[in-house]
Amino acid sequence: MKALVFNGAKAGDIETLLKEHGFELVTENPDIVVSYGGDGTLMRAEQAFPGIPKLPLRGSMICKLCHALPNEDVVKSITEGKYTTEEYWKLEVRAKGNTIVGMNDITVHNADPRHAIRYELFINEKNIGHKIIGDGVVVATPFGSTGYYRSITDSYFELGIGIAFNNSTEQSDHVVVKENSVVRIVVARGPAIVYVDNREERIALEEGNEVLIRKSDKVAKILRVV
């Protein structure tokens, strides 16, 4: 099996482990991408090699999809065929002619921390009822619900799309909607910025700009030992 090791401190140790178990290490066209690190490394690996199965190996304390087993036992199980491939759906955001896809969450945030933004939010074209004033909004997948979404809401979810209102001036409860829902955000006062996961790309928004967020047809494939 051809494996590409992505990022992570002390990657040489993992490369040695993989070679000892018969993996062929490559720099392109891998069968699997070994993400050595934590959640951030896994997301960057998926960004760089979308759709190729990922094997997350723990190199950080924060790694939701890493196994509790030692890395050596995980690698051994993979070589013995004792694994399944799980699919994690993603979200996509469209704004100003740009489309960006992420595993974790999509954040519309004030560009200047000294000034709040105003925006309207529609779920399946139904307005939630009022303009919201605050630092922005986080739209998360179940995988991403234990990150920024949880820091705002003190909760997480396992099904659907979560919407968390960040530091709103009035009470705006977080909501979880069906995963086929479409979220539309209209900026009434900016400037604002759209961020996706830990990607470098960002989209600058001004008054009147719209953001469309929905489930992507792309998935992340994660290897899980059984």
Image (spheres, rainbow, N blue to C red):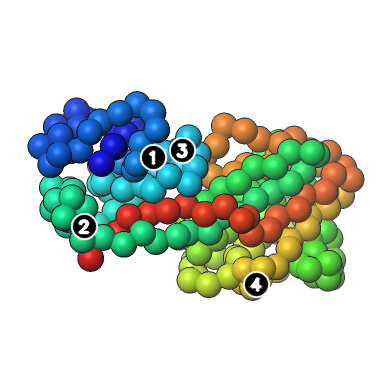
Element type where label 3 sits in the image: loop
Question: Which quadrant of the figure has residue 168?
Answer: bottom right
**Mark 4 or mark 3, which is nearer the start of the sequence?**
3
Residue 25 seen by the camera: yes
Q: Position of residue 221 (x, y in %)?
A: 42, 53
Q: Amino acid at mark 1?
A: Thr
- In the picture, the quarter occupied by the N terminus is top left
Front label number (1 vs 2): 2
Residue marked by disc 1: 41
Amino acid of disc 4: Val
Residue 49: which numbered mark, if any? Answer: 3
Q: Is residue 115 above or below residue 119?
A: above
Residue type at mark 3: give it: Phe
Of the residues tagged 4 and 2, which is closer to the observer?
2
Instruction: Estimate the spatial distance between the alpha carbons at disc 1 and disc 2, rounded to whole Å.
Output: 24 Å
- Crowding at mark 1 (Cα within 10 Å: few <14, some 14-19, many 20+): many
Which mark's residue is nearer the viewer, 3 or 2?
Answer: 2
Question: How far across and down, in percent of the image, does residue 11 sit?
Answer: 23, 31
Q: Which residue is mark 2?
A: 81
**Nearer-N-terminus badge (1/2):** 1
Q: CA distance from mark 3 to mark 4?
A: 29 Å
Nearer to us in this view, 94 or 210: 94
Q: Give me the C-alpha separation between circle 3 and circle 2.
A: 22 Å
Amino acid at dot 2? Gly
The residue located at (77%, 43%) in the rendering is 95
Q: How many marks?
A: 4
Residue 162 vs residue 7, the one in the foreground: 7
